[in-house]
Amino acid sequence: MHDFTPHESGAPRQIIAQMPADFFEILTRAMFNAGLSWQVVQARWPAMADALAGFDPVVLAGYDEHDIDQVLADDRVIRNRGKLGAVPVNARTFLKLSDRSDGFRGWLDSFDEYDARERALRQMFKYIGVFGAYWTRYTLEMDVPDYRDWAAARGRTVPAQLQLPE
């Protein structure tokens, strides 16, 4: 399990993914971050790791409704049936893309421009939106546009600590 506590600037920590579970943890974290404060997700993340097999995509790809019901019964986790139900679906997608000769990271790098990469992540993985796609790529130390430019192009508010001085 990785430490996702943001830096003082608000920027997320970047992680060097070495194993499939590292990549899948980052994707899963992006999915659960959507609509919740990072503090809520951070507080429950150790329990999420326990309940979700350490984010091992091979194990999670085999989860069925019974397994999801067991996770939902654990009051330490984020109990969102839709997102938890998406974990095995996303794990199967992740494994399919990882089986390519160039692996999952190769798939992520196979698109010529950022918007195509963002679209691909959003289309392939449930509950990954525009920010989740950006956050995933940034956290994996992959090419992303400057956040201020990216946010402005999408009509998003840029946090004060990221504002450029006048």
Image: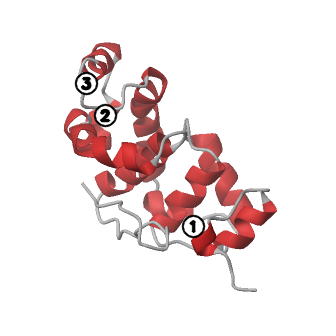
Q: How is the image coloured?
A: secondary structure
Element class at badge 2: helix
The reply to whether callout 2 and callout 1 are in contact (CB within 8 Å) is no
Percent across and percent down for residue 113 are: 72, 68
Q: Kindly identify the amino acid type of the residue bearing the numbered disc 1.
A: Asp
The CA distance from mark 3 to mark 1 is 38 Å
Q: Of callouts 3 and 1, which one flags the residue occurring earlier in the amino acid sequence?
A: 3
**Residue sitting at the far bottom:** 166
- Residue that label 2 marks: 60
- Any mark on residue 109, and which? 1
Q: Kindly identify the amino acid type of the residue bearing the numbered disc 2.
A: Leu
Residue 77 found in image quarter: top left
Residue 166 found in image quarter: bottom right
Element class at badge 3: loop
- Residue that label 3 marks: 75
In this rendering, position of residue 117 left or right of residue 51: right
Label 2: how many residues lie within 10 Å, few (<14), some (14-19) or many (20+)?
many
Label 3: how many residues lie within 10 Å, few (<14), some (14-19) or many (20+)?
few
The CA distance from mark 2 to mark 1 is 24 Å
In this rendering, position of residue 158 left or right of residue 132: right
Disc 3 versus disc 1: nearer the observer: 3
